[in-house]
Each structure stands twice: as C-alpha cells, then as structure tokens.
Amino acid sequence: MRFTSLVIELIRARPRLVVWIVVLVQAALWLIVTLPFYHAPPSDLALALAYGREYQVGSELGPPLSFWLADIAYRAAGNHMTGVYLLGGLCSVATFWILFLLGRALVGSQHAVLAVLLTMTVTAFGASTLDFGPDVLARPLWALLLLHSWELIGQRRRNVWFAWSIDAGLLLLTTPAALMLLVLVLGFALATAEGRRPLRSIDPLFALLVIVVLALPYLIFLLRADTLALHWPLLADLKPRAIHWAWLFGGLLLAITGILLLVVLNASWFSREGDDAPIIYRPPVARLARDFVYFFALAPVIAGSLLAALFDLDRVTGGAGVVLMMSGLAVVVATGDLIHLRRQRLLRAVWALIVAAPAAGVVGATLFLPWTAANEIATSMPSRAIGEFFTDAFERRTNRRLIAVAGDTRIASLVALAPGRPHLLLDENPKASPWISQAGFNETGGVVVWRASDTAGTPPPDIARRFPGLVPEVPRSFDWLVNGRQPTLRIGWAIVRPKGQ
C-alpha cells in the first residue's frame, strides 16, 4: 500500500503555505537564538552600524544602502540589535519567497517548493543571515532581478522594465558585485534570441536612465575617491591565486553539501519502494527556462570565485548566498519532470537536521567552546555593558556627552553603539572615517580603548604613537557570556579631554 505523508500532500495542494511555514520557522529559529546567546553583534556588524550612523553616500566598505537600513532598523528598535537581526530575517524570508515565485514561473509551484527546501540547506543561508550587510541585502534584490529578467525574456512582459531598473539601481547601491551580476544578466540576454528581443525597443534606455539616477550619488563618490582603479596581479602571483581559487570553489561545494546529501538519499539506489514512491509532477520545462536556470546557477559561481581569486579577496564576490541562490532550482530542473520522493521520513529528518544544525552549532559553540580555551566568541562580549561604562565614565569626568571613540576597532565599534551613538574614529586609517578627523577628535575629546595586556593598562605602541601624552586609566574588566577557561576581558582605556578643560 502506498503511503503519502501530510507534507507531500501539502506540497501538492498548498505549495505557498509550505513555503511560508518553512521560511518563517527558520527566520524565527535564528531570531530566538540571538536573544539569549548574542550579547554582541557578530563579525563586523557593529562597524557597519558605525558607518550607517554617518549616512555617507559611500565608504571603503562599499555602497551605502545596507548600512543606512541597518542604522534605521537599529534606531527603530530603540537602539537594540534585535531590529537589525529582524531586518536580516526579513531579507531571508523575502529571498526564499521571491525564489519560489521565480521557480513557479519556471518549473511550476510544486517543484518550486522543492527548490526552496533544497536552497534552505545551503550553509550560506544560516548564521550569516544575522550578520546583516551588503551580502545579505543583495540576496532578495538579486532574486528580484532574476524574476523580472525572466518576465522580460521568457514571458515578454514589457511593463516589467521599470521594476527591473529599480532592482538594478538598488543592487548597485548595495554591493560592489552588482556590476558583475548585471553583466551576467546582459550576457545571457545577448546570447539568446529571446533575450535580444526586449533590447530592441526604447524601454532599455529609460531603464538605464532610472539606474543612473538611483546610483548617481555613489558613482560620484567613486569618481571623487578614485577607487575605480583595479590592481591586476603579476604573472608570478597567478599560481597562488589559482590555489586560492581552488579553496574558494571548494568552499562553495562544501556549502551545498546538504543538497548533495539529500539527492543521494533520495536516489533509487538500494531503494525498496520502487515505483510506489510518491511523485511530484511538473509540465515539461522549456529549453529557454532550462538554459536560464543552468546559466544563473553556474555563471555567478564561476565569475564570483574567479574575481575573488584574481584580486585576492577573502570571500567570493557577491557572497555565497548570492552566487548559490539558484543551486536548488538547478538540481530540481536536472532531476526531471517526475521527482520520486523515496525514504520520506529519512528525508524529512535529514532536511530538518541540516537546517537546524547551524543554529545548534552557534548555541554549542557559545556554551562549550569557552571551556576549551580556544578562540574567543565575538558574540559573547557584553557590548551593552562596555558601551554604558565608557560613556558614563567620560560624562562623569568631563561633564560632557561622549562625542567620539577611537582605538581598537572591534571594541571602539561596540562603544559606538552606546546611547548617544558617539562617532567612531578609525585612527589606524583616518581616511576610512571622513566624518571626524584626528584634530576634531582632540577638539571634542573622547575615549580611546584597547585590549589591556597588563594590570597597568599600558596602551599598545601604535595607539600611544597616534595619541601622544595619553594617560591610561585602570583597566576595566568584563565578564563574557560564558567565562569558562578564558581570561577575563580586560580593556584598557584613556580619556582625551575636550580642548579647554
């Protein structure tokens, strides 16, 4: 007797409901993890908020849109990181929903659900979603651009040009990889007869005008900052760059291990179900749709990894979440019009384990890694206590509000999140913080912070050189979320008094 689970029946009858359930559950899971286990922003999120607080049209971190939105979300949540985490979760939900709409237009609703479920297992859609920034915001914008590109090329809808131009303009304001992504879209359009047809009208000229208007402030910043020059590698550097590319490409393959595992578990090898396994059916996929899926599943991966290796970048250009977005849909298209779902209970269990494993890993690392005396957990820093202490200390000593903070970038960016939002001076590279100069810092006064290496709080030589005459205070100790075997977090600090005091 054939057994069909409730999940498969829901995929067949209510595909949109299944998508909403799984993506909202995943977003809620990550939001719940942040409340007890994230006492400080992950990675460089605090630095991104320090940039967003200044509302610059551009910076060394790239286009400004994600930093502006992060600051708006932070302020809207009452100067609490929950607003930024919620914004990251909304970007994840929007990405998967738009991906479902794109899959529905290409392969039908039922197979689109399977594509979304597979894509959710990509590790890039895990903990990195909470580290809101250009890579996270670019995901829904890239998905929206692909959807509207297909509507222009495959469905011949001329009224989509304006929406397409908005997507492209916002993408240019979000990530430096936008130019690469737009070139890929244009390349696919020029390579196909169906793609060249929409380009013969006057609509692309109006779309280009909208894109230029949206991105004009950032383009002016690039011209003034003289950052458009590319430093090509020397011939002797090609071998290490090729090795670097292999590592980047291997990391992308590792990120889709979940998809590969589910495909293997669902294979007909050693299966006893045979033809009795439930089937998810779709109409035959057109050649153009198949080419569209395969191209945007492979081209961003190849282009993003090659550019990152060529210019010696630490991460794939555009981020793994962007370049791997179509991987699940490509597997669904390659599987065929009839997808047999074998070993249903095992597939459900493995899928749930893969999706929940990154969150469990964050919890486990936060609770148990400190007991191994291994690397510090950045999110275990008491950011609120750090910010409140140094702002209160400055106000008590000078009877003025803290205007700026400098020193160790990680610690200073946490102080910059304190009530009052002091400016962050990147004294190691003053050009990176044009909103305040060293002279301005000495004029208004501020706090200089660093990691204390002794009980006297002696500043590091580089900080002492940039701030001559610095008088260190007694270092302040803070507890980690879980102290374990780690040494207490000891922060050295000094006050630069406002001129005239």
Image (spheres, rainbow, N blue to C red):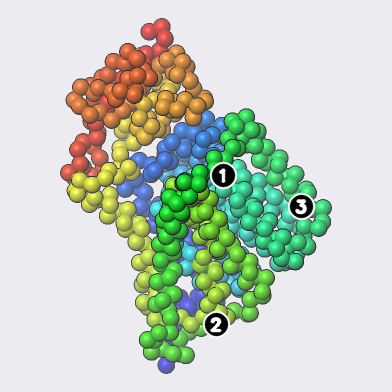
Labels 1, 2: front one: 1
Residue 344, by quadrant, is bottom left
Residue type at numbered disc 1? Pro
Rounded to the nearest whole Å, what is the CA distance between mark 2 and mark 3? 38 Å
Residue beneath disc 1 = 176
Total number of numbered discs in the rendering: 3
| Mark earlier in primary sequence (2, 3) | 3
Residue 166 vs 492, above or below: the answer is below
Residue type at numbered disc 3? Pro
Rounded to the nearest whole Å, what is the CA distance between mark 1 and mark 2? 40 Å
State the mark number for residue 338.
2
Residue 331 vs 429, above or below: the answer is below
* Quadrant of the drawing holding the C terminus: top left
| Mark earlier in primary sequence (3, 1) | 1
Q: Position of residue 26 (x, y in %)?
A: 43, 60
* Quadrant of the drawing holding the N terminus: bottom left
Q: Position of residue 84 (x, y in %)?
A: 46, 44
Judging depth in this view, the residue of 300 and 79 nearest the camera is 300
| Mark earlier in primary sequence (1, 2) | 1
Q: Residue at coordinates 59% horizontally, 54% vertically from top-left? A: 142
Tag 2 near tag 3, CB within 8 Å: no
Q: Residue at coordinates 28% horizontally, 49% vertically from top-left? A: 366
Q: Which type of secondary structure does the marked residue at label 2 adopt?
A: strand
